[in-house]
Amino acid sequence: MKRNWISASAIVLCCAASGPVPAQADEVPASQWLGSAGAVSDYLFRGLSQTNHQPAVQAGVEFDHASGWYVGGWGSNVSWLSDASTSAAPVSSSVELDLYGGWRGSLGGGWSYDVGVYRYQYPGSYPARFTLPDTTEGYVALAWKSVSLKYSYAFTDLFGYAGSGHSGYLDLSWNQPFAPGWLLNAHVGHQHVANVPGASYRDWKLGVTRTFGSSWSVALGYCDTNANASIYTNARGHYLGRATALLSVARSF
C-alpha cells in the first residue's frame, strides 16, 4: 500500500500537495518528464507502516503532457505481505510497483483539480485461495492554493481484504511555505474499509520540509493513527499504526 499520491519522498509529496501551477500569460505549457528517488526511515501509507518500521528506498517517474494528462510509475520495497508468511501459507512479496494516469489542470483563482486512476501491484508468490493485494483506485482532488482535498475510491478489494471493494480514503492536506526553502506539512485522513468491522481508521501528520536548490529536499514529520491494534498488528507483534517520527531524503530529476 502506498502513501498519499506518488511517494513518501519529500520532493514529490510537496509537488502533489501544492497542485499544478498555472502558466503565465506569456508562457507556453511544455510536456516534460519528472522523477524522484529517495529514502525514508519508515514507509508509511495512510499512516500504516509498509516495512515493519524499517527504512525503504523509493523512486518514481512521470510524464506530464502539455494538455494536462499524465502517466507515471513508482516503486518501493515493502515487507507487510512477507511479514504475514507462515510455513502453511507462504507469501513471497517484497516490492510494490505502481502505475497511474490522470488529468490535472487549473481552474483559476488559485483553484486546481486532479482526477485519475491508480494501480497498486505487489508481484510475488501467494498461497492458493489467497485474496491478492493488488488494488485499483480512482481518485479526484480539488485544491485551493496550499490546501487540498482528495478522495480515493477502490474499484477492487482493498489491499487483500476480501469483500472490501467500494472502500474509500478521504485526505485533507495543507502544505504552506513559511520561510524561503521551508514548507509546513499538515494532513488528516480517514480510511473506510468496507465490510471489514473495525478496520476503518483515521491518520494524521504534522511536519516540515526543507528544500536545497532545485533538486534536494529533507522532510521530518510526526505521524499517528487510531487504527485498531487487534487488526493492524502484524505476525511479528508490531503495531503498524503507532505514532512515528518520519525522516525522508529525496532528489528530483
Image (tube, helix red, strand yellow):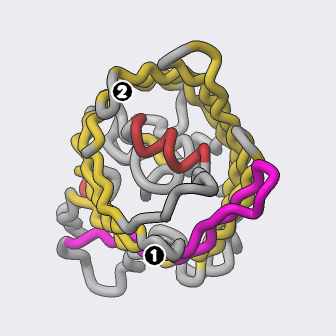
Q: Residue at x 65, y 57 (%)?
A: 199
Indicate whether 170 appears above or below 153. above
| Residue 44: quadrant of the picture | top left
- The type of residue carrying mark 2 is Ser
Q: Which mark is residue 217?
A: 2
**The C terminus sits in image quarter:** top left
The image shows residue 96 at horizontal and vertical percentages of: 29, 61
Nearer to me, 40 or 53: 40
Q: Residues within 10 Å of mark 1 (few under 14, many from 20)?
A: some
Q: CA distance from mark 1 to mark 2?
A: 25 Å
Q: Which residues are magenta?
A: 100-123
The image shows residue 27 at horizontal and vertical percentages of: 52, 57
Counting residues from the N terminus, which is met first, the one under dot 1 or under dot 2?
1
| Residue 70: quadrant of the picture | bottom left
Q: Is residue 196 magenta?
A: no
| Residue 104: quadrant of the picture | bottom right
**The N terminus sits in image quarter:** bottom left
Q: Residue at x 77, y 58 (%)?
A: 108
Q: Is residue 111 magenta?
A: yes
Q: Residue at x 65, y 73 (%)?
A: 153
Indicate whether 36 appears above or below 138. above
Q: Which residue is mark 1?
A: 101
Most frequent secondary structure within the magenta stretch: strand
Nearer to me, 195 or 19: 19
The image shows residue 159 at horizontal and vertical percentages of: 47, 68
Of all residues shown, which one is farthest toward the right? Answer: 109
- Label 1 sits on a secondary structure element that is strand
Tell whether 168 sits left or right of 220.
right
